[in-house]
Amino acid sequence: ARLLIVEKSLAYLDKLSAETSGDPSLHLGMARAYERIGDVQGGTMKANLGDTDGSIKSYRKALAILQSLKNTDSQNKETRYKIAVCSQKLGTLLWETGDLKGSLDESRKALTLLQQLVSENPSDFDIRLELVETLNKIGSILLEQNDFSGALKSHQQELEVYKSFSAGEFK
């Protein structure tokens, strides 16, 4: 049943994306839908259909839409955050398929955006938490590539961000 829903949703979104233009809120909604479908197809750490290739394609479609939105409004916080989250998800799947270079590239894209967002929104819990997860992933990928100094640097940066949290923020 889930597979049928995913297939019908993808067909609808693909048709809709070919027919729409101009409405940023519609495009943002489509990007979110592609991301959610990617989660259901093969997202990590969740129940999914095991379709990693399909998930990667859906995340890339979401990112393409989000990037076009960013190109028209480069300072939009929500768009930049969604790009970072989606890049992070794509990076995780690429890592799981053995594509360490692709994973590191996507994770570093997320890192750049998240660092900018944290500097602009230093008290935003979700952005800081996503930054911690990104730094952790980058450190782990670098460790897997035997880049010990790079891994250590990334994990040290992760620790510094953790120090910015107060005890009351984790409820």
Image: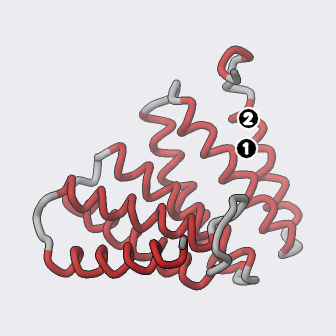
- Dot 2 and dot 1 residues touching (CB under 8 Å): yes
**Point 80% across, 44% down: residue:** 156
**Mark count:** 2
Question: Does residue 105 sit above or below 79 in this rendering?
Answer: below
Tell which of 94 and 37 is nearer to you.
37
- The amino acid type, in three-letter code, at marker 1 is Gln
- The amino acid type, in three-letter code, at marker 2 is Glu
Residue located farthest toward the left when viewing the structure as drawn: 22
Judged left or right of residue 143, residue 75 is left
Tell which of 135 and 82 is nearer to you.
82
Q: Quadrant of the C terminus?
A: top right
Q: Quadrant of the N terminus?
A: bottom right
Name which quarter of the figure residue 9 lies in.
bottom left
* Badge number at residue 165: none
Q: Position of residue 84 (x, y in %)?
A: 50, 56
Label 1: few (<14), some or many (≥20) within 10 Å? some
Give the structural element (helix, strand or loop) at label 1.
helix
**Which residue matches tag 2?**
160
Question: Does residue 101 sit above or below 34 in this rendering?
Answer: below
**Which residue matches tag 1?**
157
Q: Position of residue 121 (x, y in %)?
A: 45, 31
Distance of mark 2 from mark 1, alpha carbons? 5 Å
Q: Position of residue 26 (x, y in %)?
A: 21, 58
Q: In this orientation, does residue 125 appear?
A: yes
**Point 12% across, 70% down: residue:** 21
Tell which of 117 and 1 is nearer to you.
1
